[in-house]
Image (cartoon, rainbow, N blue to C red):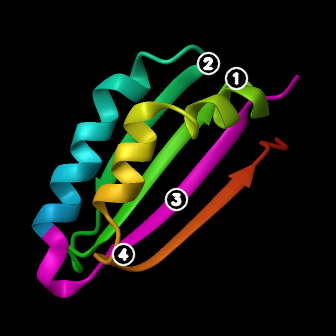
Amino acid sequence: MANITIVAKIVAKTDSVEAVKAELLKLIPPTRKEDGCIEYDLHQDNLDPAVFIFYETWESAASVEKHVSTDHYRVYIKALDGMLEEKVVNKMTRIE
């Protein structure tokens, strides 16, 4: 079965950039320990600090589904309520 790649774009409201960043950083250590997590990297745009990108690689779609049901993921979703301008998650499969 092919790995799943996720590219998640998270755009914080201007007055919430540091709070959003803090919450995103908290998510990294427990996620990297999850079964099925191959890569889980957070990036911040150099020109627009409100834009964050997670680049993730998972062993399977089942691993991704398990991830979004974890306590640390649910805490992150609740913590960011009202602080985001945009969130777009693309689930992809590498073709080459």
The span shown in magenta is 1-17
Please tell me whether residue 57 is drawn above or below residue 79 in the rendered image: above
Does the CB distance between marks 4 and 1 fall below 8 Å?
no
32 and 46: which is toward the camera: 32
Q: CA distance from mark 4 to mark 1?
A: 27 Å
**For the residue labelled by badge 3, is the local secondary structure a helix, a strand or a loop?**
strand
Q: Which residue is mark 4?
A: 11
Question: Residue 59 appears at what percent x and percent y?
Answer: 70, 23
User: Looking at the image, is mark 4 or mark 2 earlier in the sequence?
Assistant: 4
Q: Which residue is mark 2?
A: 36
Q: CA distance from mark 3 to mark 1?
A: 17 Å
Question: Does the stretch in magenta take in 14?
Answer: yes
Q: The N terminus is located in which quarter? A: top right
**In the rendered structure, which amino acid carries the disc numbered 3?**
Ala
Q: Which residue is mark 1?
A: 59
Q: The C terminus is located in which quarter? A: top right
Circle 1 packing at 10 Å, graded few (<14), some (14-19), many (20+), is: some
**For the residue labelled by badge 1, is the local secondary structure a helix, a strand or a loop?**
loop
Q: Quadrant of residue 73?
A: top left
Q: CA distance from mark 2 to mark 3?
A: 18 Å
**In the rendered structure, which amino acid carries the disc numbered 4?**
Val
Does the CB distance between marks 1 and 2 fall below 8 Å?
yes
**In the rendered structure, which amino acid carries the disc numbered 1?**
Glu
